[in-house]
Amino acid sequence: MASSSGTSSGSFQNSGSEEDLQALMDQRKRKRMLSNRESARRSRMRKQKHLDDLTAQVSQLRKENHQIMTSVNITTQHYLNVESENSILRAQMSELTHRLQSLDEIINFLNATNNAVVLGGGSGSNGGDHFMTGGTCFGTVEPMESFLNPLNFSTMNQPIMASADVFNQY
């Protein structure tokens, strides 16, 4: 019996140390579970903070994008206005250049007429005088008064304007 009691007392000690060992393992397991839970909680908090930061960044970038688009639209409108005004100014410049060339031609004609040697005689068919430049005869010249007559000037170099109702007649 001694052997059975010795065995039983040895088993009892083993079961006590096994229980202590099991309790120690359970305690470590609970500690590890708590540590893992805390780590997971911190990870979720970091992810949530990162998500909040990204959401704030998206909001800020959308705001900046809206401001840039508004600025681009204003600049584009300003460009179109300047381009339109520039087109008008180019057309006006072209018209004024054409008028200046016409006036230069008139001045050159008047200078040529004034510098021409006028031959008298009334032998022309319309009673005008012959004029000559550099030995070449250019025919008859109307009197200067008819050329400078304001009624003749009004029809020179004037644009012909048409209105829409002219086209609606037919």
Image: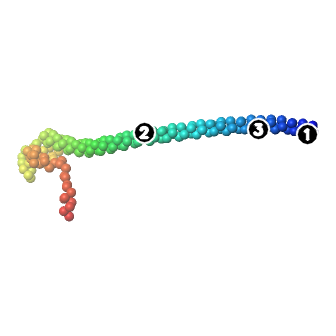
Residue at the spot 9% in from the left edge and 46% down from the top edge? 149
The answer to which of marks 1 and 2 sits earlier in the sequence is 1
Picture disc at residue 64: 2
> What x and y, as percent, mark residue 64?
42, 39
The answer to which of marks 2 and 3 sits earlier in the sequence is 3
**Mark 3 closeness class: few <14, some 14–19, many ≥20 residues within 10 Å:** few
Q: Is residue 42 left or right of residue 153?
A: right
Q: Is residue 142 left or right of residue 51?
A: left
The answer to which of marks 3 and 1 sits earlier in the sequence is 1
**Quadrant the C terminus occupies:** bottom left
> What x and y, as percent, mark residue 52?
51, 39
Q: How is the image coloured?
A: rainbow
Amino acid type, residue under disc 2 in the picture: Glu
Q: Is residue 113 left or right of residue 47?
A: left
- Secondary structure at badge 2 equals helix
Residue at the spot 71% in from the left edge and 38% down from the top edge? 29
Picture disc at residue 4: 1
Name above or below for residue 24 compared with residue 145.
Answer: above
Instruction: Residue 116: name its quadrant.
Output: top left
Q: Nearer the viewer, residue 85 or 124?
A: 85
Amino acid type, residue under disc 1 in the picture: Ser
